[in-house]
Amino acid sequence: MKATAKKTFKPLTHKQMVSKMLEKPAVKAEVNKLNREDFAILDEILAARKQAGLSQA
């Protein structure tokens, strides 16, 4: 009976995993789209807070 070698791998850090995923154009495009949407919402919230006289502190 022949023993099979187990393939071992070193786990990726979160940063390494994200970097590897962003190499795929479709993933990168979706991340960019989501970031634009999130920042647009954040800008609206901050503008409303400023207009209402609320601070970030």
Image (spheres, helix red, strand yellow):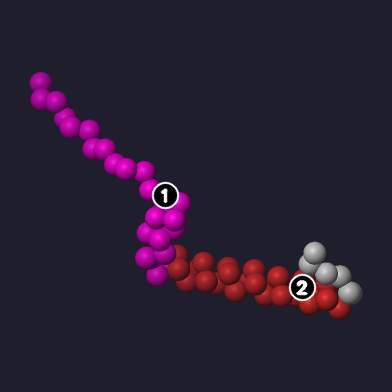
Badge 1: few (under 14), some or many (20 or more) residues near its Cα, within 10 Å? Answer: few
In the drawing, what numbered circle is on residue 26? none
Q: In which quarter of the image is the C terminus?
A: bottom right
Q: Position of residue 4 (x, y in %)?
A: 16, 30
Tell me the residue that label 1 is attached to: 13
- Compared with 18, 31 (above or below) is below
Side of 4 relative to 32 (left or right): left
Could you tell me what secondary structure mostly forms the magenta stretch? loop
Does the magenta segment cover residue 27?
no
Q: Is mark 1 on a helix, strand or loop?
A: loop
Q: Which residue is drawn at 37% across and 59% down?
A: 20
Q: Position of residue 15 (x, y in %)?
A: 44, 56
- Compared with 10, 28 (above or below) is below
In the drawing, what numbered circle is on residue 46? 2
The answer for how far apart the CA atoms under marks 1 and 2 are is: 33 Å
Which residues, given as a range, are shown in magenta? 1-26
Q: What element carries label 2?
A: helix
Q: Residue at x 41, y 54 (%)?
A: 17
Badge 2: few (under 14), some or many (20 or more) residues near its Cα, within 10 Å? Answer: some
